[in-house]
């Protein structure tokens, strides 16, 4: 039987922590539930889930719809386009049946490549290899989440690019609805014997999803970081967690000087990391923690591991940990015990001298 392979390639870099990755998890569950009701999809569709941060990993190998169990996603550091394209190519080579003189292979694989950032690895060679091999042998659709990804690079993975604004929760729902419909349509074409045709990039609500014209250079956004992300360690459980702030700007109120805007970052949340974090991260992304002025941060996270009220205490070793109030506290990174002051409704999070 000729299968219709569908690969979901999902960016799980740190900026995806929290709401975005939860939405993707939920979306994939919905797709599978819907496809289980579709006789054509049940017969032909095989789904695989690949995730990538600095490094890439197959969470679910090509599996038929009935046996498919939606996975839990973990976060990692970095955005390795080179690594994930190489991984995807090797998955295609070993798991997708090629058509030979004797037998018809699988139908043209569909790839949904979801990303919200820019590559942090040296992707040039693997991107070139992808262009020369699987770019035309797959129906690849890029889903650019938010406005931070670079269409100039993405269009070399595929000319079919959809963009949506992650701030609008309905965009995810609309997108996954469209994915479900397009898989169903393609599996129906398979039934009619025309399953190698192009996937149609139409039929979605254009107020929530937009097609990116890869030729139009004005679509190239700046690559400013949208997030300030920090890693902390729980003083009690020793679990690692991420703290995510989103960029916004606050005018300081100087009406005569409209340019005097201060870049501030608002708290989005704090999220527990699991043991996949190291495995999905590349060394360079881990070590590149930039120094950052905490003055521009708005909002204090709690600790997602032990629920201490202050998730962002900074030790003299410069690392971040959690504490519940003032007094003697021990940094779980370096083991130093120090005194932290707590005043009326606030806490001095920098370790006091002496
Ligand atoms: Zn804690
Ligand atoms: Zn320390």
Image: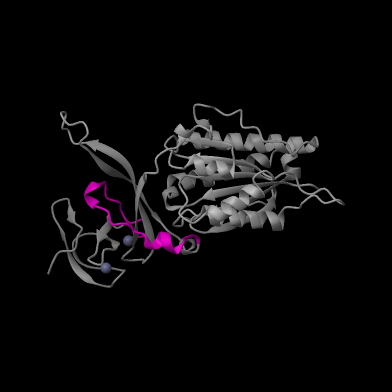
Q: From the viewer's perspective, is 289 left or right of 121? A: left
Looking at the rendering, the quadrant in which ligand 1 lies is bottom left
Q: Residue furthest bottom?
A: 335
**What percent of the width, then of the height, locates residue 275?**
47, 64
Count of marks overlaid on the render: 0
Q: Residue at x 60, y 34 (%)?
A: 178
**What percent of the width, then of the height, locates residue 313?**
25, 59
Q: From the viewer's perspective, is 51 left or right of 318? A: right
Image: 348 above or below 200: below
Q: Residue at x 47, y 34 (%)?
A: 217
Location of residue 324 (image quadrant): bottom left
**What percent of the width, then of the height, locates residue 47?**
66, 48
Look at the image and give the residue range highlighted in magenta: 280-307
Image: 204 above or below 72: above
Q: As rendered, which of 22 and 53 lies closer to the eye? A: 53
Is residue 146 shown to the viewer in this render?
A: yes
Q: From the viewer's perspective, is 199 left or right of 268? A: right
**What percent of the width, then of the height, locates residue 114?**
53, 44
Q: Residue furthest right?
A: 102
Is residue 71 shown to the viewer in this render?
A: no
How are the residues colored? Answer: one colour
Q: As rendered, which of 335 and 290 lies closer to the eye? A: 290
* Magenta segment includes 89: no
* Magenta segment includes 295: yes
- Main SS of residues in magenta: loop
Pick the quarter of the image with the C terminus: bottom left
Image: 219 above or below 131: above
Q: As rendered, which of 326 and 295 lies closer to the eye? A: 295
């Amino acid at each position: 039987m000729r299968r219709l392979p569908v690969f979901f390639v999902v960016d799980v870099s740190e900026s995806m922590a929290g709401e975005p990755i939860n939405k993707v998890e939920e979306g994939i569950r919905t797709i599978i539930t819907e496809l289980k009701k579709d006789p054509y999809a049940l017969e032909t569709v095989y789904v695989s889930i690949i995730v990538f941060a600095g490094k890439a990993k197959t969470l679910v190998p090509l599996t038929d719809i009935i046996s498919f169990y939606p996975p839990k996603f973990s976060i990692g550091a970095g955005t390795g386009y080179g690594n994930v394209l190489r991984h995807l190519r090797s998955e295609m080579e070993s798991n997708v049946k090629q058509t030979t003189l004797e037998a018809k292979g699988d139908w043209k694989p569909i790839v949904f490549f979801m990303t919200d950032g820019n590559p942090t690895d040296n992707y040039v060679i693997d991107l070139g290899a992808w262009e020369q091999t699987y770019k035309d042998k797959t129906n690849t659709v890029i889903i650019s989440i938010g406005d931070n990804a670079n269409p100039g690079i993405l269009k070399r993975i595929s000319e079919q690019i959809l963009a949506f604004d992650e701030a609008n929760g309905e965009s995810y729902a609309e997108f996954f609805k469209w994915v479900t419909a397009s898989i169903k349509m393609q599996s129906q074409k398979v039934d009619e014997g025309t399953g190698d045709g192009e996937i149609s990039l139409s039929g979605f609500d254009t107020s929530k999803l937009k097609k990116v014209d890869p030729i139009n250079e004005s679509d190239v956004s700046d690559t400013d970081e949208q997030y300030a992300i920090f890693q902390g360690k729980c003083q009690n459980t020793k679990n690692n967690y991420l703290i995510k702030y989103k960029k916004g700007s606050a005018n300081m109120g100087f009406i005569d000087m409209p340019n005097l805007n201060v870049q501030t970052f608002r708290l989005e949340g704090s999220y527990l990391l699991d043991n996949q974090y190291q495995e999905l991260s590349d060394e360079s992304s881990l070590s590149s923690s930039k120094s950052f002025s905490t003055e521009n941060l708005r909002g204090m996270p709690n600790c997602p591991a032990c629920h201490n009220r202050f998730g962002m205490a900074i030790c003299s070793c410069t690392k971040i940990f959690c504490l519940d109030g003032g007094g003697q506290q021990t940094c779980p990174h370096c083991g130093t015990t120090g005194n932290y002051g707590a005043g009326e409704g606030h806490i001095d999070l920098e370790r006091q001298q002496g």
